[in-house]
Amino acid sequence: MTRLRLTCLYGGVFMMAGTVLLAVVSLLAVHAVNKGNEPVLQLGSESSGVLLSAVCSEPGSGIGPAPAGSGMSPCVTQQRHQTRDALVSSTPLALVALGLLSVAAGYVTAGYALSPLRRITRGARRACPQDA
């Protein structure tokens, strides 16, 4: 019963620390995807070029480089939204994995914390036999 309580305690501590770490990393990644490094390639003072993938530069796709001076291309914006959505949708899966790892780490830590108590109890039982 004590090991179960300690497992919950240590597992909760590991889960909270991991959740905070995951949240900070996720927020930084989403911010980096949203903000990016606009523009990607600066050609001169009047025009800027943006590096695009082959998917965006296909003729007839309707999503190509934006005219000069109009800001980011719709393709880059779409790629950023897709990347952000992929990051956000993978967060619950990471939390589930983190929960399982936290329980396992809590169980191991509880066993480690209880090992001196087991040694003391074993020594006390040898010193005072119950047979008398």
Image (cartoon, rainbow, N blue to C red):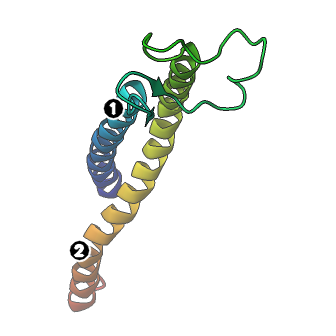
Instruction: Tell us which disc is closer to us: 1 or 2.
Output: 1
User: Which residue is denoted by mark 1 in the rendering?
Assistant: 27
Q: What amino acid type is highlighted by mark number 1? A: Leu
Mark 1 and mark 2 residues within 8 Å of each other at the beta carbon: no
Q: Nearer the viewer, residue 29 or 64?
A: 64
Can the viewer see residue 129 in this picture? no
Q: Secondary structure beneath disc 1?
A: helix
Against 59, residue 129 (above or below) is: below
Q: Nearer the viewer, residue 117 or 29?
A: 29
User: Which residue is denoted by mark 2 in the rendering?
Assistant: 117
Against 85, residue 26 (above or below) is: below
For this view, does 111 lie left or right of residue 56?
left
Relative image position of residue 40 (x, y in whole percent): 45, 34
Q: Secondary structure beneath disc 2?
A: helix
Q: Residue at x 41, y 29 (%)?
A: 39
Can the viewer see residue 30 in this picture? yes
Q: Residues within 10 Å of mark 2 (few under 14, many from 20)?
A: few
Q: Residue at x 21, y 91 (%)?
A: 127
- Image quadrant where residue 79 sits: top right
Q: Residue at x 30, y 75 (%)?
A: 115
- Image quadrant where residue 56 sits: top right
Relative image position of residue 4 (x, y in whole percent): 35, 51
Residue 72 is labelled as: none
Total count of labels: 2
For this view, does 128 lie left or right of residue 71?
left
For this view, does 42 lie left or right of residue 78?
left
Q: Nearer the viewer, residue 89 or 4?
A: 89
Q: How far, Cα to Cα, is label 1 from label 2?
A: 42 Å
Q: What amino acid type is highlighted by mark number 2? A: Leu
Q: Residue at x 56, y 33 (%)?
A: 51
For this view, does 102 lie left or right of residue 90?
left
Seen as rendered, the residue at the extreme bottom is 127
